[in-house]
Amino acid sequence: VWRDHAQELVRYATLLVGPADASDVVSAAFLRATDRLAGVDNVRGYLFRAVTTTAIDQTRSTRRRQTRELRAALPEATIDARSDPDVRRAVASLSVQQRAVVYFTFWHDLPADDIAALLGIAPATVRRHLGRARLHLRKALT
Amino acid sequence: MSTALDDAVRDALSDILDLAPPPADQPTDTPLVEQREAGQGLLLAVAATLVVIAGTVGLLAVTRDRSKPEPAPQPVATQPAEPPVASPPAPELFPSLPDSGSRNQGATGSYSQIDPASSPQASVGIARRDGDRLVEGITITAYAQPRTELFDGLAVTQVNLDGVTLDAYTEPGDPAITSVIMPDTVGLASVVSGRDPVAFLDAAGLDFFAAKYGTGPGGQVVITVFSRPDGFQEIQGSTPLAVGAREASLQLPSVGNGDGVLVTVGVHPETATHAAAGPLTSVDINGIAGWASDGPGHSVTWQVETHTWATVAGATTTEEALTIARDLEFIDETTWRDRYDVADPGIAPATPPATPATATTPTTTTRADANAVSVLVVNASGVPGVAGSLTGALQQAGFDTLGPLNAIDRTQVDQSVAYYHDDIDTGILDDLVEVAPVARAEQITDQPTPGVTGDMLERADVAVIIGRDLAAAPWNEPPSTTAASPGTEILYLLDATTTAQGHARFTALEARLQADGITIRTSATTRPVETDLLMPIGETNDWTHHVADLAGIGGFDTWTPNLLDHDLPDDINAVLAISDHPN
C-alpha cells in the first residue's frame, strides 16, 4: 500500500504543509491508518483523508512554521516554474481546507460531493471553500 | 471547458507538487521522536536543495555549520509577587453648578460605589432608530456570577420562546421593566431587560448573543451580539461594569413639587439602561450629543470625557433636565470635594469573585463543525503579533485558519469585530467567541469595513478584526514549542526606518525581543526596505521561528548582502530588517 500511494500522498501533503514537512505528515498519517485499512473499500481515499486530518491536527506552532515555510518556498523555489508566481502565492495563502478542496477540484476534477465524502465534510462546505478560493485565485490572476 | 483560471491554477499546482520530496521509507511503528529525527534528515536535505535552487536564481543564501546549542539554563524559582491592590475606577470629572444659580444653594455632593463584592458584569444596549429617537430599547446584562438576589420579591411569569420556557421578572413602576433570564447559562448569568423583552426575543431568537467571562488577568465579561431584528441597532457596545467603580453625585434641592434632581457622573454609559426604560430623544448639551427621556423621572445622559458619563435624573420635565445639564460645569475631584465638602472615600479594592462562572452561551442551536469554517484574523490593534497569536489559538480550537494579516493602511480600531458571510451556520460564532471575545459580530455587507478590503473579507467565512480592546491577547494561546535558548543565537537587528513613527516601532520591537531573551546586535541601513524582513542565515530552526512569532512576521526572506555596507559578522544567525511599515 505504501509503495502504491506514498508518492501521490507526499505530493498532496506538499500542497498542504510544504515540502519540508510533507514526508513526516504522510508517514504519521500512514502509521495511524495502517491498522484500519483492512476493512476499507477505498484505500486511496482513506489515505488522502488521513493525510488531510494529520495536516490539520498539527500543533499550532508547527502549523505556523509550516505556513511560513510554504509561503517562503512556493514563490521562489521552483526553478523551472511555468506558473504565475502570484497564483502560487495565492494558493499558499489559502487555508488548509481550501487548499485541499482546490487540489481535488483542479487536479483530480472531482465533483463537490466526492470531495465532501473524501474529506468528511458537507458538500455545501466544499462549495463554500471552493467559492472563496476561486475568488481569491481569480484576483491573483488579474 | 477549461478556463484561464483553471489553467493557471493547474499550472501553479503542478509547480507546487513538483516540490514534493521523494517518499521516505515505509514508516514503521517506532516512537514518534525517532520518526521526527528521521524526518529531520530529510528536512535538512530539502532545505539544502532549496538553498541551491535559490542560489541558482541569483539569490544568495549562506549556510554554515553550527555547533549544537548549549542547553537552556534552568529557570530560578522565585516567589510569586503579591498582586497589586487596584484602585477602583473613578470619573475623570465631577459635577458642579455655578454659585450664582439658585440650584447650587443646598446642593450636596456624595460618592457611591458599585458593590466591591458584586459580580463582574457587562451590558449591551440595542434599540430601533426612529428619526431622532431610540425606541423599543432593550439591555443585555451578563454576570460572571449568578445574581438571583436582584429579582427577589418580584413577580415572575413563565414565557415560552422557541419551545423553551423562560422566567420573566417584572419590576413594578412606570414604566414597568421586565427581565427575561436567558437559557443555558450557569445559574442566573444573562438577562435581557426592557419594556417588552419578550417581543424582542421573539424576533431575535434565543441565540442572538453570547457572553463570556475572561479568566485571565484583568478578566472581564464580554457580550457579543450576532444578529438583531430588522431595524434594530446596537446603541451601546459591550461595556464592562467595573466592580468597585465610584460614582460622584450631586443632589439638587427640589423645585416645586419634585423630589429633587440627582446629577451623577460615573465611568459607565447609561444609554442602554435609559433606552430600556423608554424612548430616548437626541438632544444637544452645549455642543455634545446626548439622549433625553421624556418618561417619568425625566432624564438626560451624555458623555463628558473619554471615560466619564453624566446623567441628570428626576426632573419634572425634560426641559428642566436639559436646563440643568446645560448649566453644569465639570471640575476636578479635589475642587469638587472642597466645594461640596465631600470626604475622601478612600480606596475600597475590588474583590474578585471566588469562582468565576464558566462562559455563558445562550444558544439552542446545534454547533457547526469549527473545522468547516475558515477564519482570517486581521490585526487592527497596533500591537505586533496579536493576529498570529489569535490565529494559533483558533487553530488549536479546530478552526480552519488563513495566514494572519495586518489591517490596510495601518488602520487601528477600538473594538474587535467578527465579520461573517451569510452562508455559514452562525452557531459556530459561539465557538469562535469562546476563543476570541470580540465585541460584536456582524454579517458582511456591501458597506466599507474599517481596516480591511472587500477582497480580504471574501477570502474566509469569518474575518476577525482585532481592535485595541483585544490588544492584550486575552485568549489561551497554546504553549509554544519553539522557545529560544537565550544567548546561543544572535539576531542582527537592522534599522531601515526613515520616519519617527517607524523608528518608534523599531525601538518597541527591539525592547520586545530583548525582553524575551533574544540576543541582539543593531545596525542601520540606508537601503530602502518596503516591509519588515526576517532573513535567516542558513536553515531555519526553532529560534528563527520564535523570532518570527515575536516580530509578527509571516514569512522568511532570503538574506540579501547588499542591505549592508559592510560584511555581516560571522556569528549572526538571522537578520531582521525593520521598515517604516509592518508586514
Image (spheres, helix red, strand yellow):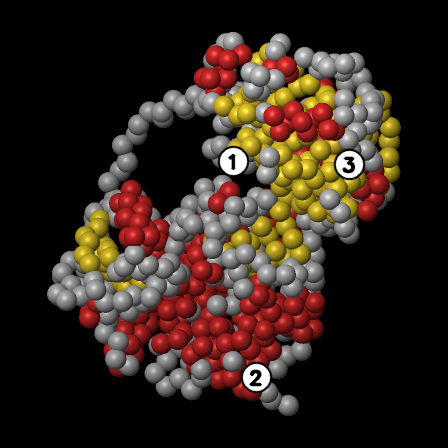
Is disc 3 in contact with disc 1, using a CB cutoff of under 8 Å? Answer: no
Measure the C-alpha gap from mark 3 to mark 1. 25 Å
Q: Is residue B565 visible?
A: yes
Which circle's residue, 3 or 2, is located before the other in the chain?
A: 2
In three-dimensional space, the C-alpha distance between marks 3 and 2, rounded to whole angstroms, equals 57 Å
The type of residue carrying mark 2 is Asp
At horizontal 19% and vertical 54% (from top left) the residue drawn is B522
* Secondary structure category for the residue under label 2: helix
Q: Mark 1 falls within which chain?
A: B
- Residue B297: x and y, percent? 76, 23
Q: Tell which subunit mark 2 falls on.
A: B
Image quadrant where one finds the C terminus of chain B? bottom left
Q: Which mark is residue B306?
A: 1
Pointer 3 residue? B279
Residue beneath label 2, please? B6
- Amino acid beneath label 1: Thr
Depth-wise, is mark 2 or mark 1 nearer the camera?
1
Residue placed farthest to the bottom in the image? B1
Q: Earlier in the sequence, mark 3 or mark 1?
A: 3
Name the residue at 71% across, 49% down.
B227
Question: Along the line of sight, which residue is nearer the eye, B421 or B11?
Answer: B421
Mark 2 or 1, nearer chain start:
2
Residue B57's quadrant in the figure? bottom left
